[in-house]
């Protein structure tokens, strides 16, 4: 199959994928119709399944989330046939339909379907939220314990797992306990004994064998006893607060600006970076520490310099002459683009990648943006506004390979390790 695909041209490959996507939506609609007919005939009950959800998860082998969406969508299609057309055209999908399915009535279905057409999940969530009961939550901070990150072990040190425990399908706390800080545990999903056997790292602060327990053993339906095993945990804070759309807009803008400097974007990493930056700029204590450091540097006695340092510099005339010659002939390093120019590029391009595909689609990426030279510096491109544009990291590499060759990024990094 792969050989067949490699023989296709770019245009043929994209056309074939587009056709497959259309047939996939048609197949999905047929599945929903079949599910409705199975439920109407109560075939799932006759086969021994208590509900359509259980039938879909255990007999059709759907995941729980996939099964729930399909059962919900099937019932929605049965009640409102107009949904079929929008599902086949791709104007709505199972996720966006599921967000409003419980709100649809014969009186408002046309209004809702028109509102959610071609909308993203967050936009549909906002539409649906206006029709749900008001939510009253208070700000709070709750101390919790979560599984400690586990360092992967080599096969020589990994304890062997019995077949019953290794094949268990039960979720570990690594899957179910997630702190609000956005930091997820890295414990293996189905290797609880490994997590229990691994001692915490020596430099892991606050890691203690906490009260968190993991059930390991047989996962059969005969009610066999399971042995709880303690695993290492770390303390975290679960933080809850309410925010509005303005907050999310500012947060997303901060994510975009920090995406090139943070290894992972999460509420925890973004809040930490923003708070530290604010404190560095506005904390009286930290400003005074910087003043003290500057004053201490000024008052450092010149006598602390090595004896004879000035004399050596004067007497070693030949050495100084050679250094001056070397400096004179060394080509100056290209100055970085000025912050004013970078800001002008960012504002002109509206903080979005400017790459436009052959079909006229502009890349919508707002993270990991680079200021790129349209005419590369390697070909004497200038740092002028007209020669600069915003590109995301992937399209920056694509353009570099197109203009300078497939090995362009490797050669650039060899010359300048700080290059993106």
Image (cartoon, rainbow, N blue to C red):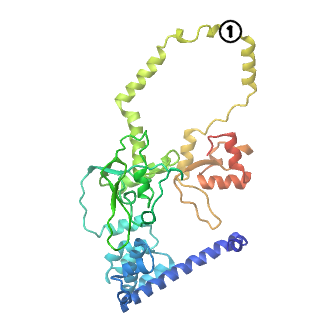
Res 325 quadrant in image: top right
Crowd band around label 1 with a 10 angstrom C-alpha radius: few (<14), some (14–19), many (20+): few
What residue appears at the point 74 percent right and 16 percent down from the top-left corner? 321
Where 400 falls versus 57 (above or below)? above
Quarter of the N terminus within the rendering: bottom right
Identified at 39% across, 55% down, the residue is 248
Residue 99 visible in the displayed image:
yes
Residue 382, given in percent of the width and then of the height, sits at 68, 42
Q: Which of 183 and 204 is in front in this view?
A: 204
Q: What element carries label 1?
A: helix
The residue under the point 35% across, 41% down is 206
Q: Residue at x 35, y 55 (%)?
A: 229
Residue 184, visible in the rendered structure: no
Give the farthest residue toward the bottom: 41
| Percent coordinates x, y for residue 16 in the rendering | 64, 76
Compared with 293, 125 (above or below) is below
> Horizontal and vertical percent for residue 323?
72, 20
**Residue 47 sits in quarter:** bottom left
- In the rendered view, would you say 271 is above or below 75? above
Residue where numbered disc 1 is placed: 314
């Amino acid at each position: 199959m792969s050989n067949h695909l490699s023989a296709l041209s770019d245009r043929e490959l994209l056309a074939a994928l587009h056709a497959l996507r259309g047939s996939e939506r048609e197949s999905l609609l047929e599945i929903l119709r079949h599910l409705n007919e199975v439920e109407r005939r109560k075939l799932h009950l006759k086969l021994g399944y208590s509900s359509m959800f259980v039938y879909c998860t255990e007999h059709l082998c759907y995941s729980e989330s996939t099964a729930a969406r399909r059962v919900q969508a099937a019932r929605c299609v049965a009640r409102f046939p107009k949904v079929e057309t929008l599902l086949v055209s791709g104007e709505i999908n199972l996720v966006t339909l599921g967000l409003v399915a419980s709100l649809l009535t014969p009186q408002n279905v046309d209004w809702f379907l028109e509102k959610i057409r071609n909308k993203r999940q967050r936009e549909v969530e906002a539409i649906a939220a206006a029709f749900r009961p008001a939510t009253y939550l208070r700000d709070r901070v709750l101390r919790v314990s979560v599984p400690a990150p586990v360092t992967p072990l080599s096969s020589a040190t990994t304890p062997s797992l019995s077949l019953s425990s290794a094949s268990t399908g039960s979720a570990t706390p690594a899957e179910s306990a997630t702190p609000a800080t956005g930091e997820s545990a890295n414990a293996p999903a189905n290797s609880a004994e490994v997590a229990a056997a691994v001692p915490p790292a020596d430099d892991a602060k606050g890691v203690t064998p906490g009260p968190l327990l993991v059930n390991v053993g047989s996962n059969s339906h005969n009610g066999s006893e399971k042995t709880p095993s303690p695993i290492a945990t770390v303390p975290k804070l679960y933080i809850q607060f309410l925010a509005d759309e303005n907050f999310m807009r500012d947060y997303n803008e901060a994510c975009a600006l920090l995406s090139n400097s943070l290894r992972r974007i999460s509420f925890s990493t973004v809040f930490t970076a923003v708070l530290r930056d604010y404190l560095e700029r506005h904390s009286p204590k930290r400003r005074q520490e910087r003043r003290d450091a500057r004053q201490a540097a000024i008052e450092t006695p010149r006598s602390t310099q090595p004896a004879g340092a000035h004399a050596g510099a004067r007497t070693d005339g030949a050495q100084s002459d050679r250094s001056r010659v070397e400096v004179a002939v060394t080509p100056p390093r290209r100055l970085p683009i000025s912050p004013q120019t970078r800001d002008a590029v960012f504002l002109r391009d509206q903080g979005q990648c400017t790459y436009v595909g052959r079909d006229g689609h502009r890349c919508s990426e707002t993270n990991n943006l680079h200021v790129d030279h349209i005419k590369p510096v390697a070909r004497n491109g200038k740092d002028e506004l007209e020669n600069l544009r915003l590109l995301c990291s992937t399209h920056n590499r694509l353009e570099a390979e197109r203009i300078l060759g497939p090995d362009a990024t490797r050669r650039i990094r060899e010359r300048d390790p700080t290059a993106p």
